[in-house]
Amino acid sequence: MNETTGTRGAVDPPIAAILEQINAITGLSVREADPEELRAADRQLREASPAPPRIEVGSVRDAVVPGPAGDIPVRVYRPEAEGPVPTVVFFHGGGWVTGDLDSHDLVTRRICRDVGAVVVAVHYRRAPEHPFPAAYDDCLAVALHVADHIGDDGGCPDRLAVAGDSAGANLSAAVALAFRDRHRPLAAQLLAYPATDFDGDFPSHTENAAGYLLTREALTDFKYLYAGDDPAVRTLPQVSPLRAASHAGLAPAIIGTARFDPVRDEGVAYGEALRAAGVDVFSRTYDGLIHAFLGLFPLSPAADAAFGELCARLKQRLADQAG
């Protein structure tokens, strides 16, 4: 059963103040704008926010991993802990269009520190220049490469996880399906507000259609830019993990969704589908929060607590695997 923190209430006050500023600005049309404009707007929004304290980890290095269309940029974070540690392959959010290694640097640093894991962050090819299956192919290629070379950065072979937020959570779920189908071991999947069904209609799409950062219109446009409008593509399990013929045998899942998020019910439905298939699932909807709350933890105590719980659950799951 999906858990909810508290009862339905208002948006967390620090986040409400941010939304008031954002909602006063006329946003770009996702489908009509030049993608570089969208990426520039995303960077400007981050740069306008107060600089959070830096999270220190053991080491950070940029590298590349061979991919189906050339080298894929990655950033490898190593915790301060000595000895073999878990490894988390992280796929950033951004609607398959925006986001990069820098946009989620603070998020990946926190996962590295709080989980005590090597984190390999992936900068996959983005839509619309590179629509499906480019991002999926890149993410799967990196995850398989990391699994095959897990000792290179001090990782344990039996403690590999995938993680992501938003579009990155969609990619994480799809990669977890591929690992199962290839009979490759995977210890956990952390999915923060994942999109799981490109052709489904969910109450949260309407309930949270506007005013909460990610709008229903933007969600629809991002999905279109990534996967087009052909139902034969949009319903593939690599695009819509909820549509997979079976969810049995998948890696244990930690799923976090936000009360005020149009994509909320897609994540909830995915947790229910996995649980029905016998998968170990922790699923929680966090009251007061919006889409992209992982990146809001320096500004919002509620987002900070939610991120902390998700990291703690992942750390425990990986520790259980070691046992």
Image (cartoon, grey):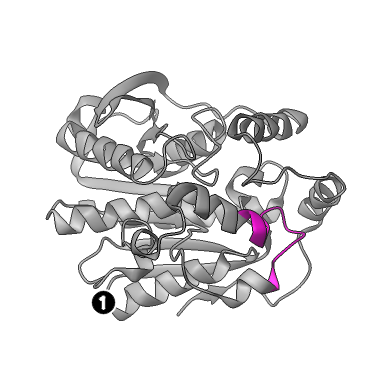
Secondary structure at numbered mark 1: loop
The residue positioned 51% from the left and 54% from the top of the image is 223
Quarter of the picture containing the C terminus is bottom left
256 sits to left or right of 219: left
Whether residue 315 is visible, yes or no, is no
The vertical placement of 25 against 186, above or below, is above
Q: Position of residue 229 (x, y in %)?
A: 46, 58
Most common SS among magenta residues: loop
Residue 102 position by quadrant: top right
Q: Which residue is mark 1?
A: 278
134, 178: nearer the viewer: 134
Per the image, is 216 magenta? yes
Residue at position x 83%, y 51% from top?
Answer: 23
Q: Percent position (x, y) of residue 175? A: 29, 51
Residue 30 on image: x %, y %: 64, 46
User: Residue 158 in the image: x percent, y percent?
Assistant: 18, 47
Residue 139 visible here: yes
Closer to us: 152 or 83: 152
Amino acid bearing label 1: Gly
> Is residue 44 rendered to the left or right of residue 129?
right
- Report the side of 46 relative to 211 (left or right): left
- Residue 98 lies in the magenta-colored region: no
Residue at (70, 33) in percent of width and height: 41
**Picture layout, residue 12 above or below residue 93:** below
Magenta stretch, residue numbers: 207-218
In the picture shown, does residue 100 fall above or below 12? above
Q: In the visual, does 59 lie left or right of 51? A: left
Q: Residue at the location (52% across, 58% down)?
A: 193
